[in-house]
Amino acid sequence: MPQQLAVIVLVDVGNALAARTLRDNTYLFDNMKLHGSEGEGTGDLVTIINGSYWQDGSQASEQVLNWLPYSLGSIPPTVPRGYQADRARQADQQALTELAALADGSGTVSAADLGRIRRTAGKRVRTTAGTRGLSGQKMLDVTGQLVADGGTSAHSYPSPVITDIIGEAVDQKIIYPAEYGSPDLVTDGWYWSATIDTSRPGTYRYTMKIQLHDLVRKGEDWVWEPVNLSFDSRLKIVTEPRRNAFTGTGMGYLPIPLGAPA
């Protein structure tokens, strides 16, 4: 049965946008550290892929590698993506309630009242052509609260979006990446995954194309503009056979000590 491997792609989006590069602003982690992965928590991760052969010499099954991108300094990834839409609906409902109460009370609404209601409703951000993963939602700060229109609170950047995986490992048919749909709200319904040919040992480089989103002012509107960057990483397929972690030998039943109770 294929083993599920995962690479966390953690991007310091604010600094990456300022420098227009992912280098020194991206940190990679995987779940294969105990198997020999190198460079955990840096931009130079080498993901170890379990041995290409079993101890008896037969070819091992393919492995499955998943990439999960997250933004550093934004809303925690444990919060479902639907949270942002829920907060926007709540703010709209509250603003409508306040507006109705003012109109019913005096029949007129002052500029100050309208300003307060606009702050309650928050700041909606549009998207431009080529933007992935966003749909004109309202802006949130790093604590998950709405940023008021005209406010100065630090905003939360949307999570990075992987748009493609290319490079040596793909060209040589070591990995077969594709984007898949999922009902998981935390991953926003889309993720990148690849099967790996474990019969060809070696170190292979691949490139992730990643889209970030920069907040810019255009006239009276705030807009998320796509910024497309790329980042290189590596995977290493090793030839060591799988071993039982308890016995240090081949896969099989655990030994039962002599004299052990039945």
Image (cartoon, helix red, strand yellow):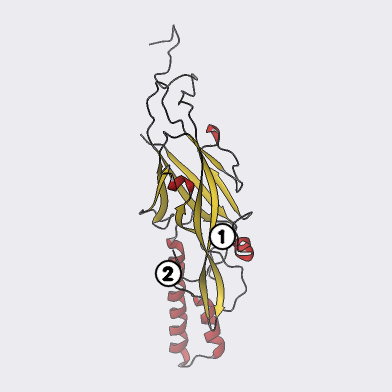
Q: How far, Cα to Cα, is label 1 from label 2?
A: 18 Å
Instruction: Give percent across and percent down for residue 179.
Output: 39, 54
- Specify the quadrant that holds the N terminus: top left
Question: Left or right of 124: which side holds 12?
Answer: right
How packed mark 1 is, by other alpha carbons closer than 10 Å (few <14, some 14-19, many 20 or more), is many
Q: Residue 3: which disc?
A: none
Amino acid under label 2?
Ser
Q: Is residue 178 above or below residue 243?
A: below
Q: Residue 135: which disc?
A: 2
Nearest to N terminus: mark 1 or mark 2: 1
- Residue at 58%, 61% in the rendered image: 13
- Specify the quadrant that holds the C terminus: top left
Instruction: Give percent across and percent down for residue 195.
Output: 39, 43
Instruction: Give percent across and percent down for residue 58.
Output: 37, 25
Q: For the residue labelled by badge 1, is the local secondary structure a helix, a strand or a loop?
A: loop
Residues at marks 1 and 2 touching, judged by CB atoms closer than 8 Å: no
- Residue at 55%, 54% in the rendered image: 231
- Residue at 43%, 75% in the rendered image: 93
Q: For the residue labelled by badge 2, is the local secondary structure a helix, a strand or a loop?
A: loop
